[in-house]
Image: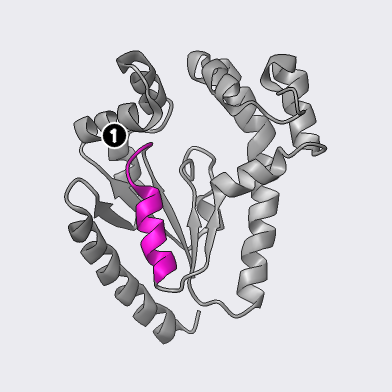
Amino acid sequence: MVLGITGGIASGKSYVTAIFKEFGIPVVSADNLARAVVEPGRPTLQALRQRFGEAIITAHGELDRARLAEIIFADPAARRDLNQIIHPAIATLAELTLQQLKDAGKRLIVYEAPLLFEAGAEDRVDAVLMVSIDPELQRRRLARRDGLDDAAVTARVAAQLPQEEKVARADYVIDNSGSRAKTRAQVSALYHQLTVTCQLSGD
């Protein structure tokens, strides 16, 4: 079984994913795959260079993520172009990586994908876990984590699907608005539920 973990920006997806990892569940991170497909020499990086120009390339020939973020969060058309370039490359690598884990006999696999719904990648997983958070707490965490002002926070939150829509489309929801202990208890309960499900189904 492949469990997709998603949620809004600064919702605590990484913390929830880390707990599953502590339980010994293999994790495939879409963010890590996204970094891999834009390494120097990769066709995806060249495509980004052609679309967005030399301004997004560092002196060492690597992708300047901060500069690219400034561009795409200020321009919806640029964001769409980015997604059209990078999502197919991530999809190919994700499917290969997930299949390798399945072939190795892993019954439960976590696929952490912040843009799971936005990328139309639901068919890559068997079930979706949405990590939700109080919107005001989300904004405060994002501002503190990334050093953003109110306008930048609003732009980044608005660039993703609303939390309510993601919650409605998810199979499981964990509320990360409380303490870490409360979140861990929710994850632990779900982990045991999924473990039983996988054993019964033979997945």
Q: Is residue 18 left or right of residue 133?
A: right
Query: Which of the pair 155/145 is nearer the observer?
Result: 145
Magenta-drawn stretch contains 17 = yes
Q: Is residue 110 above or below residue 65?
A: below
Looking at numbered disc 1 in the image, what kind of residue is underneath it? Answer: Arg
In the image, residue 121 above or below residue 198: above
Q: Main secondary structure of the magenta part?
A: helix
Look at mark 1 in the image and give the residue it sits on: 141
Indicate the position of residue 17 as horizontal and vertical percent values.
41, 58
**Left or right: 114 in relation to 141:** right
Residue 10 image point, x, y percent: 35, 38
Q: Is residue 34 left or right of residue 147?
A: right
Of the pair 99 and 122, the residue shown nearer to us: 99
Image coords of residue 5 (percent x, y): 42, 54
Q: What kind of colouring is applied to the model shown?
A: one colour
Please state the extent of the stretch shown in magenta in the rendering: 9-22
- Disc 1 crowd rating (10 Å Cα; few below 14, some 14-19, many 20+) is some
Q: Residue at x 17, y 49 (%)?
A: 178
Percent position (x, y) of residue 149?
33, 16
Instruction: Find residue 181 and report its image quarter.
Output: bottom left
Query: What residue is rendered at 28% in x and 69% in y?
Result: 188
